[in-house]
Amino acid sequence: MKIRKESFSEILFNWTAAFILLIMGILMLYPFYYLLVYSLNEPLDAMRGGIYFWPRKFSFVNYRMVWATNNLPQAAFISVCRAAAGTALSLLATSMLAYVLSRPHLVFRKFFNRLFVITMYVSGGLIPYYLTLSKLGFLDTFWVYIIPGLIGIFNMILIRTYIQELPSSLWESAEVDGAKEYTIFFRIILPLCTPVLAVVSIFSAVGQWNSWFDATVFNRNSPELWPLQLILMNMLKRTSVATSRDVPLPKDVLVTLTPESMRASITMIVTVPIILVYPFFQRYFTQGIMLGAIKG
Amino acid sequence: MSISPIQSNVPEVTSKKKNLLSKIISQKHLLIMLAPCLIWVILFCYTPLWGWYLAFVRYRPGFPISSAPWVGLENFDRFLFKSLDFGRVMRNTIVVNILTLIISMPLEISLAIVIYEMRFKVYKRVMQTISYLPYFISWVIVGGIFFQFLSMQGVVNNLLIALGITKEPIMFLGMPSMAWPILIFTRIWKNLGWSTIVYLGAMGGIDPNLYEAAYVDGAGRMKRIWHITLPGLAPTISVLLILAAGGLISGSFEQVYVFQNPANMEYADTIDTMVFRMGLQQANFSYATAVGIFNTFCSLALLVFVNAVIKRINGRSLF
């Protein structure tokens, strides 16, 4: 009798938990799905509302229009470039610094470590930063996306901790063989750091893909350098989105466009790359935050 | 007699110097690797600090900085005592942060417990993956999504009308009174899944023997959660609460900037967005720099305070 009762409450518990998780999943996923459906519907028809699960009048017109105007292919190119170059260079610089600062016998080690870590907490602020970059000639260049944020101090700490936990015999045997520090770093240590480097590069790639603020501040006058996110941002900030009057329509497009549909489709274009790579990288996430928590 | 100690010191100093020099030479490869990083940190992290000078002068863009008249603390005085900005941005930042914390923490803990207790492994993993997704998209995309949801013809308004709660669609995004709820809700939506990870990690550290003992004693699932899991989470919760106190006045610039518009500005303006608007959009460099400095030092003071509290409780500091 007792066992039966308990197993019933167990079953009830399991299904309640499953139901709660389902609700949570819907809350997290449905907004994306709704936007997808909305963006695939014919714009004027979508204005009438009532589209929740499936497009009523299926149409690609929003995507064709959005892609043809707003300089989108160029913006997509910039976004991909900054994500690729920014991640690669930042990974190289950050891990190199982490390696140097992890060596126990480094001269002035404590001083150098402090010099870098303090910058996490004290910064000049937006205006001085802007003036500095302007003096250094970074305004209206592509490199303003890459160089000023080259080294992530938090990432450096993660990698440094990881290197410090590697067995010191690695260095001893390498030094016996007469290997120089570069060789030890590139040939021995870097390959061993793959797990932590994977985590760091995912976060830095996502960060690059998602950023728009640097573009709006430092490349204000160079629309050809704007990433996708900034195009979307500008669209959100405009009360009325460019309609057929301001932009040349492709010849065979004979529909009226609505700001809502344009916004929905551009949001999808910006989101899809993240969603596509997401499942592959997902397993590294927990690892990443655990590394962070250990450092805590 | 008194000369000898000095004499004996001399060779020691030189040998120390020699030691250092030979150490530097033997580490030349390491130092060559460090050099570009040093240049980077000086150029991009330390050079901007000279710009704090701007806060103490009346600088107008286009004129040389050296010709700007010295005004002392006037810019700080204007921000703190002469304008209404200070009270408004502080109120908005602190209220939104506190309300978000109060609402989100129980939700995060409940979700973490539900995930932890889930026995259908594959289902659990799928749902967990879905719950992290919003964390990885930008605030701009979140804006794109919620503008759509909350628009006059959006899902939320349709739902409210269908349920008879309202007759006319509500203009959520343009209503000052909706600014805080929107900021709070979107922040919770974006971070909920991700923040469960910390709690799940803490639950992984709870001694499994406790659960077994409770099971043998006849405690059901709910009882085990109440008497073992929740007390097991208490240290984590207290650390997170203290950390949140450290971030009390740090706003989330991107989020607030996305959702702010002329209509709801009174309730959707924080220090960061104000610095951005005053400084870069209105070219009020000196005032914006002063506000930025004030913010940096307040955050730093909070952080130091929080660190001291944690040191007191845990016996070891966070930083």
Image: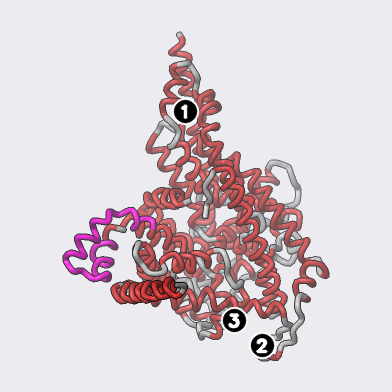
Is residue A176 a member of the stretch shown in magenta? Answer: yes
Indicate the secondary structure of the residue bearing disc 2.
Answer: helix
Indicate the secondary structure of the residue bearing disc 3.
Answer: helix
Chain designation of label 3: A
**Snapshot colouring:** secondary structure
Neighbourhood count class around disc 3 (C-alpha, 10 Å): few under 14, some 14–19, many 20 upward: some
Amino acid beneath label 1: Asn
On the image, the x and y values in percent for residue B237 come to 57, 41
Is B136 situated above or below B2?
Answer: above
Depth order, front residue of B185/A38: B185
Is residue A196 a member of the stretch shown in magenta? Answer: no
Is A284 situated above or below B73?
Answer: above
**Residue at the right extreme of this rendering:** B82
Same chain check for tags 3 and 1: yes
On the image, the x and y values in percent for residue B316 come to 52, 47
Depth order, front residue of B74/A105: A105
Chain designation of label 1: A
According to the picture, the residue beneath numbered tag 1 turns out to be: A14
According to the picture, the residue beneath numbered tag 3 turns out to be: A131
Depth order, front residue of A235/A13: A13
Indicate the secondary structure of the residue bearing disc 1.
Answer: helix
According to the picture, the residue beneath numbered tag 2 turns out to be: B65
